Amino acid sequence: MAAKSLDWKAVVKSTGLRLVVMMVGLYLVSGILEPNYLQPSHIMSTLVLCCFLGIICIGQTLIILTGGADLSVAYSVTFSACVFAQTTKETGNGWIGFAAAMLVGVLMGLFKGVGVAYLKITPMVMTLATNSILMSATFLYTQGVLKGESTAVVTALAKDSFLGIRYCVLLWVALGIATIFLLKKTTFGRKIFAVGCSPRVTDLSGINTQVVLVGVYVIASVMMAVAGILLIGHLGYPNYTMGDSYQLISIAAVVIGGTSILGGHGGYLGTMGGVVIIYLIQSILIILNIAEAGREIVNGAIILIILLAYGRGKKQSA
Amino acid sequence: MRNERTKLFLKRNAECVVAYCVLAVVLVLFAANQADFFTVYGPQSIFNQVITLCIAALGQTVIVLTSGIDLSVGNLIIFTNCVAATIYMPVTNALGGSIVVGGVATIVIVLLVGVLAGLFNGCMVVYGRLQPIVVTLATGSIFSGLARYVRPTPGGDVPSEFARFFTGRIFDVFPMSALILLLAIFLIWIPYRKSRAGQALYAIGGNEKAAFLNGIKINRSKLIAYSIAGLCAAICGVLLTAQTRSGDPTAANNFTNNSIAAAVLGGASLAGGKGSYFGSIAGAMILSLIVGLLIFWGISSYYQNLVQGIILILALSVGFFTEFFKQKRERAQAVAGKEAN
């Protein structure tokens, strides 16, 4: 009996319950403000918006778990999307475009990963510098004129449904399950947590931390490339600012989902909750008809409030 | 003895010395390309190019020293810029129409806004006990929203005298921007560095727990650090207002990236506790002047971010390569020592 009551305490204190309560609460608020939002079709369109951020956040979660943070989300997404669209237009074959974008994803990941793992550059600075480089790369590659558009397959992925569920949402769920499996059930996943807890101890335990880090950055960048391609399907055409808004909210979603920004603790299931919460907040702001300026302010404020509620560090003590 | 001290100085400030060497090369290239480099216009144009980033880098250096990072500085600069461009004429009219009085009042208000914004960041880090990176990421979004709120469209009304004062020359010789940089060094950085709070920066960045156990007032020191960072962003916002004579909430700005890059190029460690504003100045000058060089050489502006990114990565890898060769040498020496035995 005593053990059971202890369990309840843990459940009440757990991030999972907080996330569920927040999600249900926000959903009800949006439903009260705008009854249409309670309809299944609207739930699906919210989930579609979630899936792009969700797939980006697979990468962001893995990187934050290793104790870093990716500040190159904006142009990792935009550059791979531009490569996909332009290569597809030039070769006339969507699969070649897809392969090119995946290749770009792998190369971006190798670049960031080698900088972090071998050159020992702080992840935030390495990714910040990479973002600058990718920004230039995007403009140089397109020469300032965006070319290409979505292909039939990619548009279908983003717009068509299977049993009432959009393909891209299914893809997100599939990738999400794969990520959770990777983190919980594979040695590679356990190594990611180990690196995040203490790179030094992990290294001394005979684990090649550098390979783990490069692997994480490659997976993350490939996920960002996938999200870029899906975004093309959603928007129809590439544009230079398509990735910008994801920079802040990708880190926010991961942290709201209970992953420690210091690394080593957390997981992807929480991040999925964080992603949904972010978009529920957005939809409430849209119902309230708040302009861009207000939305940015409220976004920042809400992230701070959520973090203050449960992302706080320990008090300094002797 | 003297030689020993020089060696020690070079060893302790290796990155900083390298940064100044690179800066010297950049300046030589500038002199070779700019026709009026050796006239009074040369220094004026150079200091006008570098001053905003130099000031932004001061704030970033202070935060980096505490082992934090300020990702909101770019948006805070834009916000203060928008505030300055918007309130200048209304304040002037309210105070009797003199643009000098109006200008002073505007600057005071904007600096106050900056300090409060910085203090807000500081409170979130100190009392909220949140990580600086997530705090400043979130407040950056807030500042950006506030900038859009103050100035929904680019524009504003700034008298040309204000612009001329901040970008011109004193007694027709000495560039105003250079004077501002000197003021930043001698009125902000040096007094702060010599003060108890400034000394505490290095202790906190070095080892926060040890600093706490030694009775250093960590909370107060951090609050002061973040307020100074806010102040610097506001000064930068004022200078930007003088340079552009308008406020643009949607302006793409590289201040966040480049201020971090400047601090790191100048030898600051993101782990905290290591670095100095003198290094950051060299870093900031290199990063801003490189852009000028690209323009001189007729290279497409698309390359600008690429070059800045690569410089940053190279600067950070220097530490890795020196360490790598040092270890190799030591290992070779150890092997040689064993064989001798």
Image: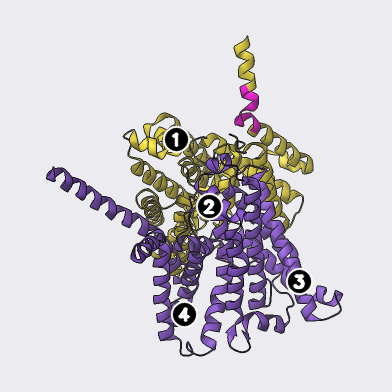
Query: Which mark, residue B62?
Result: none
Say which label, 3 or 4, has the lower sequence index: 3
Q: Is residue A151 visible?
A: no
Q: What residue sits right under mark 2 in the picture?
A: B202
Neighbor class of circle 1 (other Cα within 10 Å; few <14, some 14-19, many 20+) is many
What SS does tag 1 mark? helix
- The nearer-to-camera label among 1 and 3 is 3
Q: Dot 4 corresponds to which residue?
A: B295
- Highlighted magenta segment, given as a residue range: A10-18
Secondary structure at badge 4 equals: helix
Residue B249 % position (x, y): 67, 66
Residue A136, percent from left and from top: 45, 66
Q: Earlier in the sequence, mark 2 or mark 4?
A: 2
Q: Which residue is mark 3?
A: B106
Q: Give the alpha-carbon distance from disc 1 to disc 2, as whole Å.
A: 31 Å
Callout 4 environment at 10 Å: few (<14), some (14 to 19), or many (20+)?
few
**Along the viewing direction, whichever of A85 and B171 lies nearer the viewer:** B171
Query: What's the chain of the residue with tag 2?
Result: B
Q: Which numbered marker is on residue A193?
A: 1
Q: Secondary structure at mark 3?
A: helix
Mark closest to the chain's N terminus, 2 or 3: 3
Q: Colour of chain B?
A: purple
Image quadrant containing the C terminus of chain B: top left
Query: Residue A16 lies in magenta, yes or no?
Result: yes
Query: Do callouts 1 and 4 mark residues in contact (Cβ within 8 Å)?
Result: no
